[in-house]
Every structure is written in C-alpha cells, then in structure tokens.
Image (tube, grey):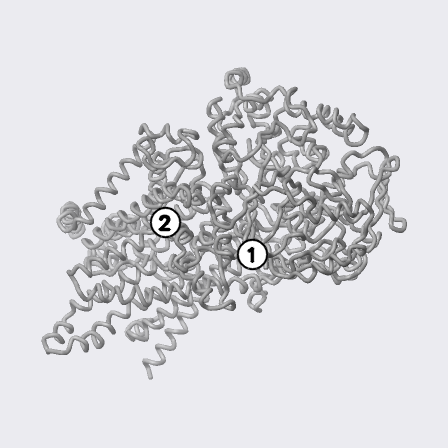
Amino acid sequence: MKHLASYMLYIAARLGLAAITVFGVASLVFFGMRLIPGTYADLFFPLATEAERAEINAQYGLDAPVFVQYVKWIGAMLQGDFGTSIVTRGPVIDEVVARLPLTLELASLALIMIAFVGFPLGVVSGMFHGSAVSQTGRHASTLLMSIPNFVLGTVFLYLFSVYSLGLKAGGWSPMSDGLLENLRHALLPSFTLSITGLGLVLATARSSVLGVMGQDHILAAVSRGLEPRAIFTRHIFRNSLIPVVTIFAIVAGYLLGGTVLVETVFSLDGVGRLLVNSIIRRDYPVVQTGVILTAAFFVLMNTIADILYGFIDPRVADRQDG
Amino acid sequence: MENKNNGLDRRSFMKAAAALGLTASSMGLRSIAMAADGGTFTFGRPWETVHLDPHASQLSSSWNIQHMVFDSLVTLDEEFNVVPSLASAFEWQGNNLVFTLREGVKFANGREMTSDDVVKSMDRALKSKGNPWGLMMRNKKSITADGNKVTFEFDGPNNVALYSLAATLVCIMPMKEMEDGSYDGAGDKYMGTGPYMVSEHIANDRWVLKRNPHYWGGPAKTETVVVRTIPSTQGLIAALNDGSIDGAMFIGDPDAPALLAGAANISVATQKSTDFNYIGMNCVADDSPFKDLRVRQAVALAVDRDKIINFALAGNAEKTYGWTQWGFTDDSKLKFREPDLEKAKALMAEAKPARTTVKYLVRAGGVHEAVAQVMSQALAEIGITCELETVDGGVWAKRVWGTNPSEMDITSSAYSGFPHPLITAHWWAPELSGFTKGYVPVNEEYTAALNAAVTKATGDEVNASLQNLYEILNEQCVKIPINVNSETIAWRSDRVNMTPSARQSQNDVMAGVETWEMKA
Amino acid sequence: MAETDIAQAKKAGRRKGALSVFFARAGIGTMIAVALLAIMVIVGLAEPYLPTTAAKAVASGPRRAPPSTEFIFGTDNLGRSVFARILEGIRLTFLLSAVAVFLAGVVGSIIGMAAAWYRGVVDTLIARLADILFAFPSMIFGLIVAAILGPGTLSAIVAIFFIVLPTMVRVVRGAALGIVGRDFVVAATISGASTFRILFVHVLPNVASVTVVQMAYLMSIGMIIESGLSFLGLGVQPPLSSLGVLLRENSAFMNIAPWVVLAPGAVLTLAILCVNYVGDAARSIIEPSQPRPLE
C-alpha cells in the first residue's frame, strides 16, 4: 500500500510539473509574438491611416496593455476558449482542428515505422555484437540521424515525381477519400519525418540490448543452459525495453512539433504550415493555440514516459521526495 | 504557347453581346444547355488571399478570387479597353460619367441588383480603410442614382475614373444583405454578381467556389471551381502531374516553362500582365546615400536590365524603362536607359556619399531575391555594398510604406500594373497617395503635372502629359522599373478545355474561368 | 587543497592521454570522419582567400550548367559556381553552429553548475525554465526569433543558442551534482573558498569533458537547425550562402538540374555525419557504457 500511495503521489507530481511547463510555454509564446514588430493591421493595411489601423487593432483587443491582454487570454483559455483568428475571423480551434488530422497522421505513421522498423533492427543489431550486422546497425543509425529531413524530402520529391512507383510526392488525400489513396500520399512525408527518430530508436535499442547482454544475469542464464528464446524474451527483451520506451515517448512528442519542414517540402497544409503562416500574418491567437497544443502533447508524452519509467522501475517513484 | 484560334471566347462574346444591348435572357437557351455541364475544376496557385473584404483589399493577392465572384460597373478586354460589365453602357456627358445599369443582374442569392446597391457600394468602397480609389476620384462631387442610371458627377475632366472603376476595389456588393446583417461584407463567404460564389474557404489551403445560378452572363460551364494554395513551383508541378489539380498559375516564377517542358498532357501558356518589377531607393531618410540625385542616377546607369532578365528572370520577361508599357509613351526620349558604368562611376566620384554600405530590403517570394542579388553585384561595381534582407510581404509593406522614413535604403519589389498608367503614376506623388511618403520625395512640379493630367487634360493632352511625367520620373530615378512580367499558366489538356487570356491586369489571372470546361 | 591539486594533475594527465586513446580506439570510420571534418574546417576557415571566390559572382557561367571541369558541381540559376558557393556554405554553416553551441556551452555550464551548487529554489527554477524551452517546438521557436530580430545570421545564432541551451544545462547539472558532494569540494568550502572559485576551479574541470562531448552532439543539432532556418529563408541571407540557403534557392530545379540540389544536400549530410561520428568516438572514451544522449 505504501508503494501504491507513493506511486500515485509521483504521478500527481509529474502531472503538476507538466502543467507548469505548458503554462510556461503559453506565456513564452504570448510575449514572444508581441515582441515581433508590427501587428496584423500594420502589416496588411499599410495603405490605411494610423487611426484606421488602431481601429483594427482595437477590434481584436490589441489596444489594451499587453499584461491585460495576457490575463484575459489565460482566463479565456482556462475556460476552453482559444479565441478568434485575426485573419479568418473564425474560431481558432477550427483552424487548428482542420489541420490536425494531417499532422497527427504523419506523426502516427512515422511512429509506427519507428516502432516496427527502428526498434527490431536495433534489437537485432545489439544481439549480434561485433558482427557485420551490429556494425551496420551502428552506421545506419548515425546516418539516419545526420540527414536533415528537408534534404531527404527534396530528394524524394524529385525521385518520386520522375519514377512514381505508386507513391505520391506532394499533395494530400484525406482518409475520408479512401485509405489507399491516403497512404499513397502519406508514406513519403511520414517516412521523411521519421528518419531522425528511426536512427535514435535504433541506436538506443541497440546500445540497450548490448548493455543487457553484457550483464551477469544473462551470462548466468546462458551458463544455466536456458533456451536462447527464453533468454531473449525473459531477460534481454524486457530489460532493454526501459530506455527504449523513454526514448520512444520523447520521439513521439518531438514528431508533432517537427513537421514544419516536411510539410513545407511536400506542400502539405498541416499544423506546422498553419503556424508558419500565422506567424507571418501576426495571427497571435492561432500561433498561441498551435504552440500550446504541440507543447502539451510533447510534455504529455514525456510525462507518460516518466510515469511508465516509475511503473517499470518502482525505485524511481520511491526516490521522489519532493 | 496556346493560340487563341477559336475566335471569341465566351467572356468576350458576352461583352460583345452586352455592347450590342443583348440581355442574358435573350440567350437563355444556350445558358440552360450549359448549366447541365457539371464537374469540378481544381486550380493551383502559389499564394493565398490576404485581405477578405474586397473594398479593403490593398494587396493584389486578394483580387484573383474576388474577380470570380464580384463584378464592377465596367471591366477590361484583353487590349485593356474599358468595356461594359454591370453597366450595360456608359458615357461622359460633360463632366458627368453616366452608367446605365444592366437589366436582370442578380446576386447569387437571387435578389436583383438595384442602383441602391451600386451607390452604397461605391460609398462604402471609397470610405474603406486604405482604399486608394477615393484619390482617383478626387474631383468627384457626387454619385447619384436615377432609375437604372448612376451618375458620377465631377467638377472637371477625370482621366482615370473610368479605368479605376474596373477594379474589384470598387466592386458592387450586396448592400441590402450587408445592412440587414445576413451577409458579412468583411467575411470570406463571398456572394456577388459574378459567375461564382464561395461555398467554402479554408485559409492557406483552398477556396471552393460554386456556380452562381443567377449569373447575368449565363451559368458558368463548370459547377465547382476549387482554387488551392500550393506554395512552391515543384508542388504545383507535382500536383499537375499526379492529377490532384487540373490547372496552375506560376506567378513569380519565370523558370516555370523550363520546369514544365516535356511533361505529358500539359499545355503551357504565357500570360502577359501589367505588373512590373522595380528598384526603389530611399530619398527621404537623412542618412540615406540615395537622397543625392547623382547617386540615384549612378544606380540607374549601373542597372543592367538584360543581365537581370537573362539570369534572374530566365530570359522570360520584357524589358521596361518606365511603367507605361502599353504604348502610351515614347522611350527614345529618356535619358537613363542603357547601362553606362563609366558615367555611373563619374557620378559617384562627384557625389562622394558619406555612407556606401546600404540596407537592401527584398520582398520574399517571386523573383525579387534573384533580382536583388544581380543588383547588389552591379552596385558593388560603383562602390556601393549591399546588405540584403529578405522579408515577407507584410513586413516589407510595414517597413517601406508604413514607416516614415522607410526602414530601408534600397528595395526590390513589384507594382501591380493597372489598365491605365495614370493610376500607377500616383505612387510617385507621396502628398497624394500617402503610402510612399517614407522614401519618395515630394516633387511639386511632378504633382502639379500629375494633377493636371488627371483632372484637367482632355483629348491628346492626356498622352502628352503622360510623356512629360514619364520623362520627369526617368530623370529623378527614385524608382527604376526593370521589366514587365509574363506569367505562366499550365493545365492538363487531357482533362480540361481552357483558354487563359493572353494579357491581364489587376491579377485577373483566371479571367474567362466561366468558359472553362472539364472534358468528359 | 592537496586533494584538488591531485585531481587537477590527474585531470591533466587524462587529458593528455585522451587524444592518444581516441586515436587508438577509433575505427577506420572514425578516422575518415576526423580527416573529412578537418578538411572541412580548414576549407571553411580559408574560404575567403581561396581562388574559388570569384566564381561566386552572378554570370560566372551560363545558368544551371551541368558539372564540368570548370564547374565541378555545375552552376546555379544565376550562373554561379555551385562548388564555390558550397565552400562558403561549409564556412557559414559550421561557423554559425559553432558560435551558437560554444556560447550555449559556456552559458549552459555556468547555469548548470549554479543549479547543482545552490540546489533548492534556484535549481527548481532553472529546471522548470529548461523544461519550458525544451517543450517549445524548436522550428517554431526559430521562426519567432527570426521574426523578432529580422532574418539573418544573428537570429540564427540566437535561435540555435536557446534551442540547445536546455540540453546543455541538464547535462552539466547532472555531472556537477556528482562533483559537488565530493570530498575536495567540501574541503574547499570549509576552507572558505568563494563560490566562484569552487565552481570554476574545482567543479568546472571535472565537468569539462562532459560539456565538450555534449557540445559535439549539439553541434550537429545546431547545423540541422541552421540549415533548416536558412531553408525557410530566415537564416543566412543571400548572396551569402549557407548549405541551407543553397537548398532553398535551388530545390525548385531538382528535376532539370539535380546537381544544384544534390551537391549541397550531400555535403550538408556528410558534414553532420562527420560531426556525429567524432562525437560518438569522443563519448565512448569519456563515458564508455552510457547510452547515447537523448538529443
């Protein structure tokens, strides 16, 4: 019981920290956007008079002192109101939700590739230490982490526009128009998005398996004459999972915020492009909401990793003393 | 290059018919036959509309969609002659410009357009934030309606009024619905008298336009037109190739024809526009070396238009020395035309500017980044070092137009050309147009000549005064026009029948869209 | 004091040995990476004085000429030598990332050590701030910085600095925590040494190796961010070229002139690869059993 209680306390503490972090990001993006010279009216109504521009600013409450705007905005957000887009004049949440499926799908597909390609490759390459397979795994992971995704995307755009091979480079077809067509558009950008994470998970799984393999209890199991399959499932796989789960959650969090360049290269209208365009247009509420959602997802994934970590290794939770 | 060999296209036909006094209902049979055609035509373009309210849309990126939904009293043919649109006839009666409204024009909701809509639309447009058209009509006394006649009363001649009325900035909007609140004039669910109306708009992604069943020219041939924003040339070409779009405009990318060469089933046409690129210099800021006329003239003599066109513009543009490229003026009398480095260096030696490192502000997108790089090399030869900074259109506008003095020394940008050069001529007169006051010096001689050209000149005097303005500006070298743009339009010839207009002004790239038709 | 001297002597000895250990352990791959990296750094430093600079001028050759003996990687759309521009790109890409990461290393070390030393409120505050920066989507952060400061080298450096800073702080804090409890630090504290002296004379030398290895990793992150920002038009401004600028300016011509994109893309990837290999090798010496750092 004591253990369960301390574990619950641990989860509560983690969630509390997560909330503080998201609040910090919200404040940073709020004041960051207002440090950018020029409001929407300044940039897009250059021919209007000063008074006319002030009137446009007032329409969006931008005439109030910044701190007042901040307090109002935080208050509204706590009630679930993300505000009105300055450019489209519609609810911000509609703008974000319209793009979310695309970005989420890219990130999910990338994560699936990382889980089903990066992880097994890493495990295999870790198990055959010293062999060519293991060395290939090491070099492959370094290479994958060294290719900037927009370079790979540009090369794909060229290769697949010349030799289609059934995949579409650029453009999008929503899932509602058929899964096959959707996947044909989604595979290249999501693979492009996945490479850094792929390399990272491959490397982590590899070094984690390598580390476990060298430990005494594995050697003991081998000397006890346990079947290799049993050694693998009971000892190696389980024990090497912990760092991989952590890294996996972090990669998942990073993917959602990392789509800007991929969306740019493949001309996709996702959350990343929405944020870029909204920064250019000084559409403060859209940028704020998009950044908060992305950061919240990142923090949530990290928190889940922490909680899982505490679950797998109870000492972590017990050590938590404040 | 697609040749226009089918004689009159539909829009021209409509205009001819309109001129002959035919009404839409007298061609009813043909309209019904066409209404049966459906389909969806998807068009890609590299930018998104910035302003939604047509009367307050100061940047030309917005006009493209607005042209498809809204009509003005008059419009332009391919030779940039003013021809009837919502007005079936117009004439000058002394200093009064009298429009006869077309009969049977309806908004997309089925309500008939009245002279009240026209008068109130004009009133709203001319009062809208930053709408420069009030300036063009500066000697207007009143706009009044009498039955189906609308009269613009001026206190003298006005040589730009008729041309400026062809713009979407003064389009006729459904004022009754706007007054009773059932239509949001500043919103994006456009509803006007044009061939299409907006059914959906997802910012930065797409506009979905549906056929206006009540269009006075007869229903458009294609039921649905989707205009998608695809920001890169590669993206547009890939989308054309894989069939996710049927047509595309490659605005601001002179390399598009080379990139499209050899693609199967793709027709490519070049559309000349009145838009032109220019180099502007800050003559207002105290520390700007370009305040000195000799330095500006040295820059004008260092500009190598051929090099800019051949390298930065892929050889795919027409050289210009001024902004009156449609045969209004005579270039041979200009003093600053061809490059002359020796003379430029001599002028620099004479001027000895205190500062020779300058901030070169570049408008992002299109060709300006490339033009600025060729220019900065040319300026290096006369001893001026440029620090380039590329910023988005909005920031550019704020720093050049919205700040006084402008936050730049020299800049590369473009002007949207208009059907008559007297309109653009105002951008050199800061005490009139206002927005260029941050870098264009007040030149009383020029402004007086411009005012005379607009509100005093009659007959041949108009072109003579235009030539005078042209020569003054060439010598002042505040802005140096480089070239007139040619834009590329491409479409899937296996999927769509379309004939883009050979020339356009005011960003009406998709003029004639109501005649474009999907193949079965 | 005596113990500190011994620690420092040990440290010096270890540092002297580090390079020889590095080369003794390095595989052929690492050796190649070190050699390539050295070439790139030398070329980058020497670039302004190389004879290739003239070919960076517009109209040095025809537009988009294919690779030839005169233009090894062909020319770009303004008739400039792609090879000459790549050399300049190597210079700027390395320089910007190096400056930003070095600054982050210095500032991150100070903050990280302070957190480990003061613990309590200071530590918590620093940890939260690091969390916040860490959770902020990094490309969007770069975009906002570029919008505030204007596009250019300064905003690229500032953006990279803040993006890599939280990682630096965490790593140094972790390493310093293990040091501040050690006897020689306690002894120094009792003998009345100032905090400044303790941190910089006693703690810093012991966390320096971790800092340097982390900087090698962050260098590759910095290069990716720099090229990404330049690719979006917000970093280095043309006609100056970073490798990202070259990709931005030419990616449209991939189909008709692949060399103008493939060459800078390959050089950029190779440069990051070399940095990663060298970083890997350096880490395997200092912390042989540690898994790869998260960034």
Under circle 1, the secondary element is loop
Amino acid at pointer 1: Asp
Q: Residue furthest bottom?
A: A1
Judge from the rendering whether residue B515 lies leftward or rightward of residue B296; answer left or right.
right
Residue pointed to by mark 1:
B205
Numbered disc in front, either 2 or 1? 1
Q: Position of residue C201 (x, y in %)?
A: 24, 48
Q: Residue furthest right?
A: B146
Say which of C247 and B519 sits in front. B519
Q: Within the image, what quadrant is residue C122 found in?
A: bottom left
Residue pointed to by mark 2:
C224
Query: CA separation, marks 2 and 1?
Result: 28 Å
Tell me which chain the residue with mark 1 is part of: B
Tell me which chain the residue with mark 2 is part of: C
Q: Is residue C172 above or below residue B318?
A: below
Q: Position of residue A283 (x, y in %)?
A: 57, 54
Amino acid at pointer 2: Ile
Q: Position of residue C105 (x, y in %)?
A: 32, 48
Q: Residue at x 81, y 28 (%)?
A: B459
Judge from the rendering whether residue B377 lies leftward or rightward of residue C20; answer left or right.
right
Say which of B177 and A72 sits in front. B177
Q: Position of residue C200 (x, y in %)?
A: 27, 48
Judge from the rendering whether residue C268 lies leftward or rightward of residue A21; answer left or right.
left
Q: Within the image, what quadrant is residue A84 found in?
A: bottom right
Q: Does mark 1 fall on the same chain as mark 2? A: no
In the picture, the disc for residue A312 is: none
Under circle 2, the secondary element is helix
Q: Where is the N terminus of chain A found, in terms of image quarters?
A: bottom left
Q: Within the image, what quadrant is residue B330 found in?
A: top right
* Mark 2, other Cα within 10 Å: few <14 / some 14–19 / many ≥20: many
Q: Where is the C terminus of chain A found, in terms of image quarters?
A: bottom left
Say which of C85 and B482 sits in front. B482
